Amino acid sequence: MKKHVFSLFTAMLLMSMLPLGAHAADNGYGSRVPVTVMSYNIHHGVGLDNQLSLERIAGVIRDAGANIVGLQEVDRFYGERSGFQDQAKELAELLGYHYAYGANLDLAPAEGQTENRQYGTAIVSKYPILKSENVWLSSFGKEQRGVLHAVINVRGVHVDVYNTHLGLDVTSRLAQAQEIVDLASASGSEGPALLLGDLNAEPASEEVGLLLNSGLFVNSFEGVEDAYTFPVRNPSATIDYILTSPGVSHANQRVIQTEASDHLPIVTEVVFARKAGR
């Protein structure tokens, strides 16, 4: 018994002699801050079985261990297809997360309802959202698109998170991609950034190239084979992305197999570098 007590005391003494950063390096309070990030087009919570279930969507997020999630095709009091739910709020409550919502369609209330019918994107986050803003993007008479920009405090590191759902035609997507680059360039932020979203474009496309050639973002799935996200069954297209600022490291990139939506979600584990003195 005395031998065990002595060993425990010795171990505690040795740990106390280590620099503070050595204790914190693996839990996000040292120089490296790990986060699991997801992008997911949730198809207003309706799966391939044509059943509406935010609980199922929340389960996908929870099982993946995602801490910051960019969601596309999110309804807010939109209609019967989603039970007039405030989907961002309900998902955040199911997860115990913070959230921000950006309405790209903002229509008059449905008959018998009092809230505007809205459709857009959302960010749900384990970490506090300090501020958020939804910016409409050029859409040339098509369905209005936008980018939701939030600043999230990840254990003292302020991360700019952009979440978007680009248009269905190349002309719109090129304009929208340039506007996202302009927005991110003008933010004045010195912290890391994430761009999450359904870009409706393949990795070799001109519009994705515009984002990557800006110097602001890199593709966290670069070099990952068969990262197909659409359609859910026998997927053949890569149109969903997690882009990060160049200084962010990536690991364990994966596509989650689930029929909870008509897109497959993608997940990346990233590490933000904490600046000295912060």
Image: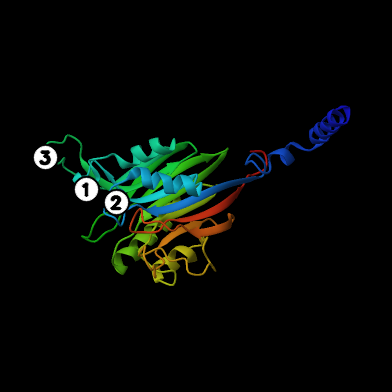
Q: Which residue is mark 1?
A: 81
Residue for point 12% across, 36% down: 112
Residue 213, percent from left and from top: 49, 66
Q: Earlier in the sequence, mark 2 or mark 1?
A: 2
Dots 3, 1 in contact, CB < 8 A: no
Q: Is residue 133 above or below residue 226?
A: above
Viewer-closest of 150 and 4: 4
Q: Is residue 127 above or below residue 223?
A: above
Q: Nearer the viewer, mark 3 or mark 2?
A: 2
Q: Earlier in the sequence, mark 3 or mark 2?
A: 2
Q: Tag 2: residue type?
A: Val
Q: Quadrant of the C terminus?
A: top right
Secondary element at tag 2? loop
**What's the CA distance linking mark 2 and mark 1?**
8 Å
- The quadrant holding residue 169 is bottom left
Q: Which residue is mark 2?
A: 46
Residue with the most extreme left position: 111
**What's the CA distance linking mark 3 and mark 1?**
14 Å
Q: Quadrant of the N terminus?
A: top right
Dot 3, crowdedness within 10 Å: few (<14), some or many (≥20)? few
Q: Tag 1: residue type?
A: Arg
Q: Nearer the viewer, mark 3 or mark 1?
A: 1
Residue 103, percent from left and from top: 29, 45
Residue for point 48% across, 47% down: 63
Q: Which residue is mark 3?
A: 111
Is there any visible trace of residue 71 in the rendered image?
yes
Dot 2, crowdedness within 10 Å: few (<14), some or many (≥20)? many
- The quadrant holding residue 265 is bottom left
Residue 182, percent from left and from top: 41, 56
